[in-house]
Image: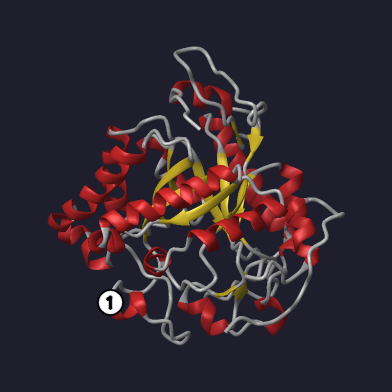
Amino acid sequence: MNLASFSLSIFRTLVAMPVATSLWLAPHSGWGQVVPTVADQQPLVVRGAVYIPAEAFNAPQMWKNFSPTETRRDFGYAQEIHLNALRIWTSYEYWQIEPGQFKASLDQLLDEAQAHEIRILVSLFENDGVAPTPENMWTTDPKKAFDVCSPALEIVSPAHKERWEQPREYLKWFMQNYRNDQRLLAIEVMNEPDRNAAPFARSMYQTAKSMEGSIPLTIGSDSIERALGYIPLGLDIIEFHVNFPPTRQYFESEITNATAVGKQNHLPVWLTEWQRLRPDGSGWGKTKIPQAETLPDYASLAPIIHQYQIGNFFWSLMVKQAYLPPQRAQGTVNGLFFTDGSVWSLHDARAIADDPSLKIPERKVLPH
């Protein structure tokens, strides 16, 4: 589908709603005029999931082993539960190795997304994970295979600003190729930059902002408090994460606080990571949590998501062992769909889809 670009001024006007979570998915045909397409007649609440293929332990593996057939199948699963968005990571490291193959695979993924009426929130850099060494990137040993940070922490460090130019070239390449690509929902410059990575994230965001097209820009933040520090950079969307809240009241308060920040700043707010209620601890520390709380339970939080109509992405579409070492050590399992189309929990699938009539085979088999 050939879509014309639409201005960010119109985008910001349309999304500045009371709870600041909606996004208009229509192309712009000139200043002051928005022309809805057949498929995109109304403002839309983003309903999404994090997507990493079932057999990939990290983003480099996802792109090295990219399969259009697998992508088509999995995006079909997303449609079954009425999703209209997915959040993915690119891989700066794989782009360095195979730039042509990476672009070809990314374009195939985006084509499949468009065919399934799904928009992609794409993240360019990742602050979480283990070092992106060749061994860490390519091992499939469940005891050693985890998410990898991108770029390496020593590159991100403010002490090594002279090394920022190579990842900046990747960022520029991406913006030149995709800043007006309507298959994208938004471009997330970096995920969860901490204090050490914040200067890098700000610098990369400023470069992206200087090249901005019609696709909005954002930064993935692990809390609304941290997101506040990025708003002055000119965020187009505020992101925050609440993966394992201890109570429903806490989860609800995080959503109401975030939406209040969005309303104050006239920006949409998306909860781009959430998983389940965990009364006995988040699992990020060394304290062992009960085995029952290591398993998926999206139904514990989904009704609150629907109540507030907040744009959201649950972690994750495919059933997988936890992405990061602390949660893997706890035995955490994430996800909804198995590769055969069955789900871990029909109750969860119905809760996420907000559709009690949904019928999908269920099986509870731990991934390994």
User: In the rendered image, which quarter is residue 279 located in?
Assistant: bottom right
Where disc 1 sits, the SS reads helix
- Percent across and percent down for residue 31 are 45, 13
Residue drawn at (36%, 31%), measured in percent from left and top? 213
Q: Is residue 286 visible?
A: no
| Residue visible at 34% across and 78% down in the picture | 136
Q: Nearer the viewer, residue 123 or 263?
A: 123
Percent coordinates x, y for residue 234 in the rendering:
38, 34
Please give left or right for residue 34 compared with residue 303 in the image: left
Most foreground residue, 352 or 75: 75
Q: Residue furthest left?
A: 162
Amino acid type of the residue that numbered disc 1 sits on in the rendered structure: Pro
Colour scheme: secondary structure
Residues 226 and 290: in front is 290
The answer to which quarter of the image holds residue 282 is bottom right
Report the residue marked by disc 1: 134
Against 279, residue 11 (above or below) is above
